[in-house]
Image (cartoon, grey):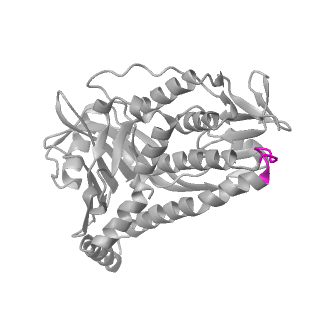
Amino acid sequence: MPIENIVVCGTSIVGLATALGLTKAGQRVTLLGPSVAVPPAVPGQYCPRVYAISPASQSFLEHLGVWGMLDAARVTPVESMEVFGDASGQVALRAWQAAMPTLAWIVESSELERVLRQAVQVFGIAWQAEKFQGLEAGVVVTDTGRRIPAGLVVGADGASSPVRAASGVSHESKAYHATGLVVHLTAELPHLNAALQWFTTDGVLALLPMPDTADGHQVSMVWSMPQAQADALQALPEAERNAQLELRLLEASQGRLGRLTVRGVLAGFPLFLEKSGMVAPGVALVGDAAHRVHPLAGQGLNLGLADAGQLIDVIRNREPFRAVGEMRVLSRYRRARAEPVLAMSLATDGLHRLFASQAAPLALARNAGMQLVDRLPFVKRFLISGASGG
């Protein structure tokens, strides 16, 4: 049967990876979305948004041929993770406990986009730098009136996905009434390639290891803070905001990395728990268009890349007589992703709820539970395997 055109709507990391993987699987692909060049990397300056790439995602990116294109000097391996409760609870996970060299890698968003764009250009994937406008019986209509035939439309167009809205795929959203604050920091003490996380009364604070700079040791902060507190902090003049943030960081991190100094611009994004039906006839959703989870586990992009990998496998392995957009084909994708997405949603939402409660009995139980986990090697191996995508 003739090769059908697959239109991937969305040109961020997950969209680019999906288009590249489908092309390598022998499909004809058109990318639809903005084509804004990524500025060259500047030594000592880092993109404010970074991701913790799991071993499963690293393997997928390696299969796409882009992992080796990253500048190794800008990629930081995470060799251990330390999680602190709001009292005496503490869990330390180390890669060697699961016979792994690395738990994850911290990579800038801009660097991932750069290498994926380069690969897309090398493969000559058609790219229409227009906006999705609507669907009409197997045709994608753009904002300029262009009509692109599509046997399958992949919605990789983010949390407010126009593709999802146009296709009628079910969608549920719950606001956490919290904000994810991000900024890079200079640390007084070395991070030793450890990712650190604290569950505090001010939300969940994570410090991710980054390459050292001329100013000293560097970490990236992700602080999931109640919305009212985050709004008040962001509303302050810059100097006062940075001074207050540094004081709160020193207290929340218990001085683990010494003094932490702001070295960038504080940014924030609202937090949601979202799920969708993921597919409709001729339509499949991936990444944030399909689901969003609380960032406390740092698994949002990893879930999206796993979506892309699974969709590519389903399309590649379908029967020769089946069209790419048949519901029988797309239902296989939905079933394959249902369990891992649900498991991550329940885990992150459950942890958020567990530590959001200030009830004394619950606080005692959760910290005692962390102490117990820290003494059980087989439980640690299970946690590491789950976080790595294994």
- Residue drawn at (42%, 63%), measured in percent from left and top? 352
- Residue drawn at (35%, 48%), measured in percent from left and top? 104
Horizontal relation, residue 53 to residue 195: left or right: right
- Residue drawn at (54%, 52%), measured in percent from left and top? 292
Q: What stretch is highlighted in magenta?
A: 320-327
Q: Can residue 260 be seen in this view?
A: yes
> Could you say where residue 3 lies in the image, as x and y percent from the top left?
77, 34
> Could you say where residue 282 lies in the image, as x and y percent from the top left?
78, 44
**Residue 378: quadrant of the picture:** bottom left
Horizontal relation, residue 179 to residue 273: left or right: left
**Residue 153: quadrant of the picture:** top right
Which one is nearer the viewer's eye here, 151 or 113? 151
In the rendered image, residue 173 lying in the magenta stretch gets the answer no
**Residue 208: quadrant of the picture:** top left
Q: Examine the rendered structure and indicate whether residue 292 appears above or below residue 34.
A: below
> Could you say where residue 237 lies in the image, as x and y percent from the top left?
31, 33
Which one is nearer the viewer's eye here, 268 or 59? 59
Horizontal relation, residue 104 to residue 142: left or right: left
Q: Can residue 169 be seen in this view?
A: no
Main secondary-structure element of the magenta-colored stretch: loop
